[in-house]
Image (cartoon, rainbow, N blue to C red):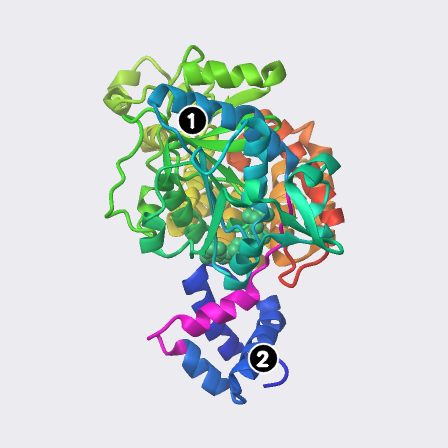
Amino acid sequence: MSGLLSQVDFGVIRRRVREFSGLTFEDDKCSAVSKAVCARMDELGLEAPDDYLKLVDAGASTEEIAALTARLTIGETYFFRNKNHWRAFDEYVVPTILEHNRSNGRRRVRVWSAACSTGEEAYTAGIALRERVAGLDGEGVEIIGTDINPESVAKARTAVYTANSFRGVPDGIRQRHFEEVAPQRYRVKDGVRSLATFRLLNLLAEGEMASMRGFDVVFCRNVLIYFDKRTARAVLGSLRRSLRPGGFLFLGHAENLHGTASELQCREVCGTFIYMRASDESAGRHDDPSETLLGEDENASRGRYVQPASPGSDSAAAATARVSGGDIIDIPSPAGPPVPNDASSTASATDHEAESLDRLGARAIECLCSGLNVDARKWLEEVLAQRPDDVTCRLGMALLLAGCGDSDAALHYCNSVLQDDPLSAEARCVTALVHEGLGSYEVARRELEKAIYLDSRFSVAYFRLALLHERMGSREAGDRALRSAIATLGDDDDQRVRLYSGGYGKEAIEQICQRRLGELALTAPSPQGRGG
Ligand SMILES: C[S@@+](CC[C@H](N)C(=O)[O-])C[C@H]1O[C@@H](n2cnc3c(N)ncnc32)[C@H](O)[C@@H]1O
């Protein structure tokens, strides 16, 4: 085959790739996908696209779709990528785990680098652990790296790297943990290499995912950005179950929980965000095998507030002591009185008799800002039952439903607000969120541009537009939007920022924008147009 796939063939192939791997390809990626298909057809000695389509669409085997997917993945990675993550790992996560192990009689630290690409992330964990814990060996630590791409996994096993993987790695680390095996080719030394094993694993494969259990730390960075929201949510549910209670999850900085998997607490540590599975078993949800990957959607709104580790607890004390200058912040930290985490939280309207609807609405919005979706929903429903025209609560409900993937209901609320107030920038922003979740990026972009037109100081609209542009491969436009987000954050309303960004505060957003700008300047354009 030469040239582009027809739109119909492109549609079939991208659907199969998405079903298999979660990777999504917009219309403008037809040429990249066509190239990969051409390469596979050459390898298989096929000339007619129809013959290739039969192979891909056969349904009986995923072998060919796996081979094609491997050609479409973006494996961008390097040692110590995202320095703040590794600071948080070193200064907070590892001490917390060691303390936990000491008090529970556990001997091993277990780390999973999910979507590890060529292994740099897994070996970085090994290096960080070796640097911190004297005499650490395979008895004391187990690191597993997995990826969907067999070539990447093979390369991870050989553990030989070139300069590209060493961006920003201090010389001392390079000398201690690598040996030059050929000019400009460095192999990870045995001490670290022996800590890590690698294997193929598809994050969407329920059976394989179910076998990954009991990890202290999971890294799943810079892969969910390639998935649609529904798939990202499902994978997040699986990752949560792979952590032991109290275990930590690292996501890429353009990735967040999308308002789901709320039994993961977000913590700001060393200037970055990490997530922790609730350590309190009573707050943690059961590992129900009937919770299938895609069934997770239904659970999306079952968020619960879990008290952060009490400051007096051993692990918190040990860990906090290692982190200088109060550099750790628990999120969510709901304003006002803590929201109870038991049956009493199902209090009905009568329990709130003394509270005006205004206060109830305000509390609902604050809960929403903090990811306490169950409580937010209950109170939003209470307010809306008595005051169906309340704009803030209708928008809050739209946001909540968008976060649960209930697009129709979310759009219903957005449209009802827009009918009353066609100039509502916030309603445009939520509408964009819903369309982005549905994969209609063009519609989402237009809605965000309308939001900005209606309110040129709406910082989160710029921020969301920037991420969307990046996803769509428009880097310059993304860059501009990031700068506008930074410029408008200062004057924007704190709560509005947290509400429409999914819980991030101004400082966090500014940091993310700054980091994205730095990274965008450094990262060469990728075939999919998204910096991986
Ligand atoms: C950009 S790299 C990220 C590497 C590393 N986590 C990091 O942040 O530096 C994304 C990786 O995700 C892998 N990937 C994509 N879809 C996957 C899936 N469904 N299951 C497992 N890995 C997947 C790709 O093969 C690629 O190696």
Is residue 69 located in the magenta-colored stretch of the structure?
yes
Q: Position of residue 312 (x, y in %)?
A: 42, 10
Location of mark 1 (residue): 367
481 over 26 or under it: above or below: above
Question: Within 8 Å: ligand 1 and the Cβ of disc 2?
Answer: no
283 over 111 or under it: above or below: above
Q: Amino acid at mark 2?
A: Cys
Location of mark 2 (residue): 38
Q: Would you call the spot at circle 1 few (<14 residues within 10 Å), some (14-19), or many (20 or more)? A: many
Q: Amino acid at mark 1?
A: Cys
Question: Within 8 Å: ligand 1 and the Cβ of disc 1?
Answer: no
Q: Secondary structure at mark 2?
A: helix
Is residue 101 located in the magenta-colored stretch of the structure?
no
Inspect this view and state whether residue 438 appears.
no
Q: Is residue 177 left or right of residue 524?
A: left
Q: Residue furthest bottom?
A: 47
Q: Would you call the spot at circle 2 few (<14 residues within 10 Å), some (14-19), or many (20 or more)? A: many
User: Quadrant of the rendered structure where residue 74 is?
Assistant: bottom right
Q: Quick one: 150 or 524, which is closer to the camera?
A: 150
- Nearer the N terminus, badge 2 or badge 1? 2
Q: Position of residue 367 (x, y in %)?
A: 42, 26
Q: Are marks 2 and 1 in contact (CB under 8 Å)?
A: no
Q: Quick one: 276 or 365, which is closer to the camera?
A: 276
149 over 46 or under it: above or below: above
Q: Is residue 489 left or right of residue 391?
A: right
Quarter holding the N terminus is bottom right
User: Quadrant of the rendered structure where residue 41 is?
Assistant: bottom right
Q: Which residues are magenta?
A: 57-79
Q: Residue furthest top?
A: 312
- The residues tagged by marks 2 and 1 sit, at their Cα atoms, a distance apart of 51 Å
